[in-house]
Image (spheres, rainbow, N blue to C red):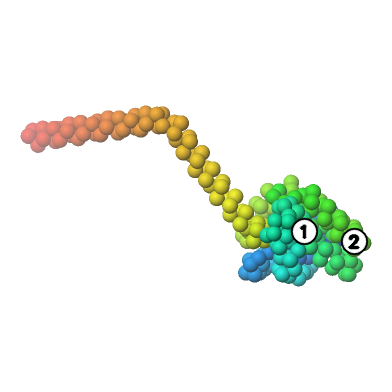
């Protein structure tokens, strides 16, 4: 099996499960969607190092951001595609490259790690994987790996692997940043709403705390006064 891999962290669990089943996949890294160049290099080095340590055959496909931009980026910028259509075109380009390599090098089947992420279009991934494999005469070995996402996250963090916070393309990066900003703003607004709703309760608690502090201060002052009196009495005695 040739396993198209989107990144190192998402490859951990699919490879583990396949090996437990007696299947030894070769990893094919074809991701022209990733940008900029330093981000691509960082993800490539992460998965290459992991594959080496895991004893896997690792193959890097081509990185052709210009071709990706022509087929995926330009239609999106021109408003000719929805987000799902943009992702479909992206999957299609990468799967076609992987399937062509698989057919040329005698692989019987091809799978992908893209379905690990719950943020991807899983049904579209399956459709495009099957379409690409059929076009090149190999079997599509699709699996929905989403149930393993949490474990892949845990293992990759435990291993200190680089974990990207966006899918790969500039559009997904901008969308991720916007979504994170919206979540942050929503949390801030929720906190302000809660504070507003519980203002009287919080003020009462603050008054009670202040009263307790004052009471404690008065108690401490009285004890100090008594100690001074006792000390003076002892001196006089």
What residue is at 89 percent from the left and 66 percent from the top? 103
Q: Nearer the viewer, residue 167 or 89?
A: 89
What residue is at 34 percent from the left and 29 percent from the top? 208
Locate residue 220, reporting x and y percent: 24, 34
Classify residue 63 by image quadrant. bottom right
Locate residue 76, reporting x and y percent: 70, 58
Q: Is residue 188 left or right of residue 55?
A: left
Crowding around mark 1 (Cα neighbors within 10 Å: few <14, some 14 to 19, many 20+) is: many
Residue 124 shows in this picture? yes
Image quarter where the C terminus lies is top left
Q: Residue furthest left?
A: 236
Crowding around mark 2 (Cα neighbors within 10 Å: few <14, some 14 to 19, many 20+) is: few
Q: Nearer the viewer, residue 41 or 1?
A: 41
Disc 2 versus disc 1: distance between alpha carbons? 16 Å
Classify residue 161 by image quadrant. bottom right
Numbered marks: total: 2
Q: Secondary structure at mark 2?
A: helix
Locate residue 113, reporting x and y percent: 76, 56
Which one is in front in this view, the residue at disc 2 or the one at disc 1? Answer: 1
Earlier along the polypeptide chain: callout 2 or callout 1? 1
Q: Nearer the viewer, residue 56 or 128?
A: 128
What residue is at 52 percent from the left and 45 percent from the top? 185
**Which residue is label 1 attached to?**
89
Residue 55 shows in this picture? no
Residue 7 vertical position relative to residue 41 in the rendered view, above or below:
above
Image quarter where the N terminus lies is bottom right
Image disc number at residue 135 = 2
Q: Secondary structure at mark 1?
A: helix
Q: Is residue 187 left or right of residue 1?
A: left
Residue 230 vertical position relative to residue 76 in the rendered view, above or below:
above
Q: Residue furthest right?
A: 137
């Amino acid at each position: 099996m040739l396993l198209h891999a989107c990144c190192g962290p998402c490859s951990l669990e699919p490879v583990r499960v396949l090996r437990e089943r007696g299947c030894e996949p070769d990893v094919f890294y074809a991701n022209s969607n990733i940008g900029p160049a330093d981000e691509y290099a960082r993800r490539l080095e992460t998965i290459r190092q992991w594959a080496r340590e895991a004893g896997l055959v690792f193959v890097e496909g081509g990185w052709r951001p210009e071709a990706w931009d022509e087929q995926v980026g330009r239609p999106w910028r021109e408003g000719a595609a929805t987000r799902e259509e943009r992702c479909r075109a992206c999957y299609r380009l990468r799967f076609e490259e992987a399937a062509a390599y698989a057919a040329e090098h005698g692989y019987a089947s091809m799978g992908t790690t893209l379905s690990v992420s719950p943020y991807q279009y899983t049904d579209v991934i399956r459709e495009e994987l099957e379409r690409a494999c059929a076009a090149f005469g190999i079997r599509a070995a699709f699996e929905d790996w989403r149930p393993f996402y949490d474990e892949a996250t845990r293992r990759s963090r435990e291993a200190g692997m680089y974990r990207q916070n966006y899918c790969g393309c500039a559009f997904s990066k901008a969308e991720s940043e916007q979504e994170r900003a919206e979540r942050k703003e929503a949390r801030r607004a929720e906190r302000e709403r809660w504070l507003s709703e519980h203002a009287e309760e919080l003020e009462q608690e603050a008054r009670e705390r202040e009263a307790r502090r004052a009471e404690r201060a008065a108690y401490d002052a009285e004890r100090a006064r008594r100690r001074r009196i006792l000390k003076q009495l002892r001196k006089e005695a």
